[in-house]
Image (cartoon, grey):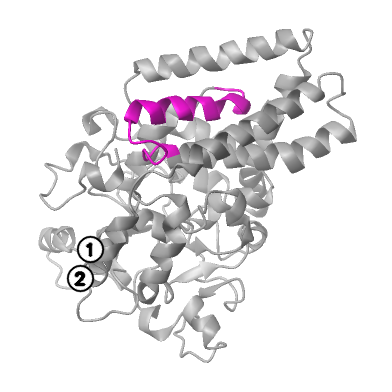
Amino acid sequence: MASATQTDSAPHLRASAVKNQEQKNGQGQQQESGRIPPPESSLVEDHFFWTYTEEPHRSRRQAIIKAHPEVTKLCGPEPLTKYTVLFVVSLQVCCAYLLRDTSMLSWKFLLTAYVIGATSNQNLFLAIHEISHNLAFRSPMANRLLAIFANIPIGIPYSAAFRPYHLTHHKSLGVTGLDTDLPTALEAFVLDSLLGKAFFCTFQLLFYAIRPAFVYSPPFSHIHLINIITQFSFDYALTKVSGGSLQPLLYLLLSALLAGSLHPCAGHFIAEHYIFEKVGDGKGTESIQRRKMNGNQTVGANGMPKEVANLPPPETYSYYGPLNILTYNVGLHNEHHDFPAIPWTRLHALHRIASEFYEPLPCHRSWVWVIWTFILDKNVGMWCRVKRAQGGRVVGGSSANAKAGRAGEGISGASNGPEEGDGWKESEIQN
């Protein structure tokens, strides 16, 4: 959706890929809401929402800048980020050290790991996410080093590897073979049940860690090496300072695991891009505009406002609740994807300025509700993602290195051809 209000000034999604495909197929009309058949090379029966339409964020960004050019002044580093990182890292290291003589199976250890540790490490995951866009310092190297520092309480090195995958997720949203945030067809097939979804939600951090290796591998750099050396040096030093006890390190690792498990803040992983279009009666997911109208808005067959009911399913959902305080406002995810160069402290300002673009979009009221519904509701699950067979770019490596057919994915960015002249600019994503 370029703009859910569908005003005359809002640009429509670029449809060149759709037209090309229609010409190839000899079809004069695209399928329902831009949906196309899955690729023939899929290893299992494919139920993803495949489309040739452009991802919505670029078009909406252009429309917002046209309507509100002042939003560009919100871009740039946020000095508060480095102090927040310093505080949370210090808190986690302190807790780890204090638990050096506490049994891992004691209630004190487990409760601290879940309440303080998991919340803190989720905060650090999202600090690294923020820093990956160069939004802590103007210097790219300073951002890389701060991300490595933020990585310390997580226990294993990952900040250097995360950045190219995450920036590719922005530039290639939904593009199979490039966007590693997408579950593979094999994952969706195996986990398409209540127990499967519960398993995914419990260990989703492991899926995010392992899946990229089956999609594509960016080149190993000196930043990766610094990240590895720094992390393992800290782990060794922490163990030595703790008198040889492994409890501090186990606390940090358990905190990281719980942060991506059945934890309220972990709801954002599912809430951001899984389609909840067919879920319930709108009590958990609905637009701000509809809430203001107390549900008196005319709705379509799928329970969404009539003016957006016939559009392709939303690919990104925002959340405006209190957990944003702990998570660098990652809940404002439509705003973040529209303007990845705007730091976390100014996303609410962007929302206020361009409220006519954001208030009609469906958003989640609760991340806990998202996890609960994802597991128990048969209308939402691993298949509920929008995928594209074309477009996108790899950050930190050539798309030609993406191997078609890996992990059940039959299409890669290698066949996309040259990038169109109106594609992403590095300055827009702060790369």
Q: Nearer the viewer, residue 19 or 6?
A: 6
> Quadrant location of the N terminus?
bottom left
What's the amino acid at mark 1?
Answer: Gln
Which residue does the numbered mark 1 point to in the structure image? 62
Write the start and end of the magenta stretch as one range: 131-156
What's the amino acid at mark 2?
Answer: Pro
Q: Nearer the viewer, residue 25 or 340?
A: 340
Q: Residues within 10 Å of mark 1 (few under 14, many from 20)?
A: some
Residue 48 visible here: no
Please determine whether, in this image, residue 305 is positioned above or below residue 357. below
> Quadrant location of the C terminus?
top left
From mark 1 to mark 2, how far is it between C-alphas? 8 Å
Instruction: Say how many tags the image has.
Output: 2
Q: Is residue 165 magenta?
A: no
Q: Residues within 10 Å of mark 2 (few under 14, many from 20)?
A: some
Q: Is the residue under label 2 in contact with that under label 1 (CB below 8 Å)?
A: yes
Residue 196 appears at what percent x and percent y?
63, 47
- Residue at image position (66%, 44%) is 199
Please determine whether, in this image, residue 62 is positioned above or below residue 391. below
For residue 350, which numbered disc appears in the image? Answer: none
**Chief secondary structure of the magenta span?**
helix
Label 2 secondary element: loop
Q: Is residue 153 magenta?
A: yes
Residue 383 appears at what percent x and percent y?
48, 55
- Residue at image position (33%, 45%) is 176
Which residue does the numbered mark 2 point to in the structure image? 11
Q: Is residue 179 left or right of residue 86?
A: left
Q: Looking at the image, is mark 1 or mark 2 earlier in the sequence?
A: 2
